[in-house]
Image (cartoon, helix red, strand yellow):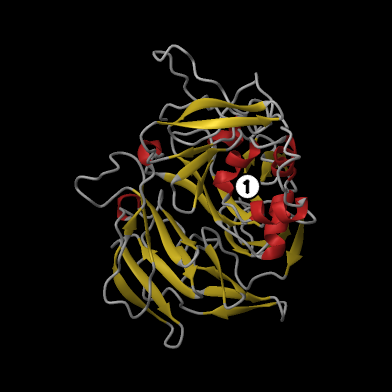
């Protein structure tokens, strides 16, 4: 973590800190469980910027170093409302519309303006306005090995924010988990001492809440997001019983809806949303045998259709991870761990076409520890770099590309996130569009 001043905390305490007159003293941003700050990488050289207090008596400025444009904790200063009565002002409604279009990672810059905007940002009202006007951006939530906290990255991985600690027991904290996003909720399913539970992170309040539990609590299941909803299917219960049930999560009602059952019981399967349908692909049956089929749920028909041998052309290792799949521009892509090859599914011929290698080592752990997701109109892959000498060292290597079935060569773009990279073994990764 690079050094920097503390500007403003999530709970609204302490908006700006004056310079310490002793330049030898430096304050490092605390990353405690309650801290929810955006940390910007690739920081420019330290520069002085001024925060001015306008009043009828004149203008007074406070200088503070702006080395990485982030927010932190401070308890000595509260936001002050200056008198701007002599300055033409925007109405609150128009001001809210403007602020709603600002990237969320820059909200802290506006929270130091006055108490009204501070209250507005904390209320979650800006997220409601963003939904109404259709203004959305992606957040990438990552939980990596060796770390106790979840992190949220902006779409370009230029800044990150540490989420509050999940108030779960040690069994949940150190056990395997699955994650999925629904609207502005991040859903984490895992096992506590008393059984399988769900914790949800709410973006509006920056807080964790327990539940609601699934109708059939499960793990090792397939999942997919579609707008404000999340779908889960298959998996095993806390007692190891295989499932063919499916459910849909509604963040508005904070409830699960039971869906029709699939044709087969399957675990270690993967899910995606394509052609306005929920696909459940691959996995293993009750005997542990590999399933090459897929099933697709049509909400209009309220029924599942079976797609035999959808993975027939792919190589599946004995201890391989669930299929690494992602949908971009309504096309299905797969990362084959044994060869590190990116493949695209050709719907007309129902076959897979190889597009070329990916720049991460999916083969080193048979697919485990690699994040392979859709990020807008791009594919996102995170893991250990395939380069002999990697710029990321032991940290995660992050790449995106805009794929196409007719592309002759894949152009992977590395995303630099400074020295704040996490481990290159990714345990969980989910993308939220809000």
Number of callouts: 1
Q: In this view, does 217 lie above or below 258?
A: above
Nearest to the observer: residue 94 or residue 186:
94
Query: Looking at the rendering, which quadrant does residue 278 occupy?
Result: bottom right
Say which of 73 and 411 sits in front.
73
Q: In which quarter of the image is residue 170?
A: top right
Asked whether the viewer can see residue 204, the reply is yes
Residue that mark 1 sits on: 189
100 versus 82 height, above or below: below
Return the residue found at the far bottom.
348
Q: Where is residue 181 in the image (x, y as percent from the top left)?
A: 61, 55
Residue 224, x across and y down, in percent: 59, 63
- Quarter occupied by the C terminus: bottom right
Which residue is at the far left? 388
Q: In this view, does 57 lie to the left or right of 339?
A: right
Q: Which image quadrant for residue 372?
A: bottom left
Q: In this view, does 227 lie above or below 168?
A: below
In the displayed structure image, the side of residue 258 where residue 222 appears, left or right:
left
Residue 290 makes an appearance in the image: no
Residue for point 61% across, 34% down:
164
Determine whether the residue tagged by mark 1 lies in a helix, strand or loop: strand
Looking at the picture, does residue 1 appear above or below residue 394? above
Query: In the displayed structure, does residue 369 sit left or right of residue 85?
Result: left
Mark 1 is surrounded, within 10 Å at the Cα level, by few (under 14), some (14 to 19) or many (20 or more) other residues, namely many
Residue 381 in the image: state x and y as whole percent.
39, 56
Q: Give coordinates of residue 413: x percent, y percent.
A: 33, 58
Quarter of the image that includes the N terminus: top left
């Amino acid at each position: 973590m690079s050094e920097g001043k503390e500007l403003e905390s999530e709970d609204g305490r302490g908006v700006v800190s004056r310079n310490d007159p002793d330049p030898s003293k430096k304050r490092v941003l605390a990353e405690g469980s309650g801290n929810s700050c955006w940390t910007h990488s690739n920081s420019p050289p330290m520069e002085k910027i001024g925060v001015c207090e306008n009043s009828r008596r004149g203008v007074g400025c406070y200088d503070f170093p702006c080395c990485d444009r982030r927010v932190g904790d401070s308890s000595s200063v509260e936001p002050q409302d200056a008198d701007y009565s002599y300055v033409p002002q925007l109405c609150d409604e128009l001001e809210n519309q403007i602020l709603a279009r600002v990237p969320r990672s820059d909200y802290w810059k506006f929270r130091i303006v006055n108490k009204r905007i501070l209250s507005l940002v904390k209320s979650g009202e800006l997220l409601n306005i963003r939904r109404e006007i259709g203004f959305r951006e992606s957040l990438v939530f990552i939980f990596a090995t060796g770390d106790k906290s979840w992190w949220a990255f902006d779409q370009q991985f230029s800044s990150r924010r540490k989420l509050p600690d999940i108030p779960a027991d040690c069994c949940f904290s150190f056990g395997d988990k699955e994650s999925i996003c629904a609207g502005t909720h991040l859903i984490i399913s895992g096992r506590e001492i008393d059984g399988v539970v769900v914790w949800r992170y709410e973006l509006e309040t920056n807080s964790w809440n327990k539940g609601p539990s699934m109708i059939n609590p499960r793990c090792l299941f397939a999942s997919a997001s579609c707008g404000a909803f999340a779908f889960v299917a298959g998996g095993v219960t806390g007692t190891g019983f295989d499932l063919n049930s499916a459910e849909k999560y509604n963040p508005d009602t904070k409830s699960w809806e039971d869906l029709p059952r699939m044709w087969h019981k399957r675990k270690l399967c993967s899910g995606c949303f394509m052609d306005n349908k929920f696909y459940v692909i691959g996995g293993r049956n009750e005997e542990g045998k590999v399933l090459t089929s897929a099933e697709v749920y049509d909400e209009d028909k309220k029924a599942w259709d079976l797609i035999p041998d959808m993975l027939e052309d792919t190589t599946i290792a004995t201890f391989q991870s669930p299929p690494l799949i992602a949908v971009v521009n309504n096309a299905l892509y797969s990362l084959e761990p044994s060869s590190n090859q990116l493949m695209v599914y050709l719907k007309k011929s129902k076959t897979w076409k190889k597009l070329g290698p990916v720049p991460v080592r999916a083969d080193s752990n048979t697919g485990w520890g690699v994040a392979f997701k859709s990020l807008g109109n791009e594919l996102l892959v995170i893991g250990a770099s395939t380069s002999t000498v990697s710029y990321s060292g032991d940290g995660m290597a992050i790449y995106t590309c805009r794929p196409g079935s007719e592309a002759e060569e894949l152009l992977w773009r590395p995303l630099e996130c400074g020295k704040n990279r996490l481990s290159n073994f990714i345990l969980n990764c989910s993308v939220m569009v809000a």
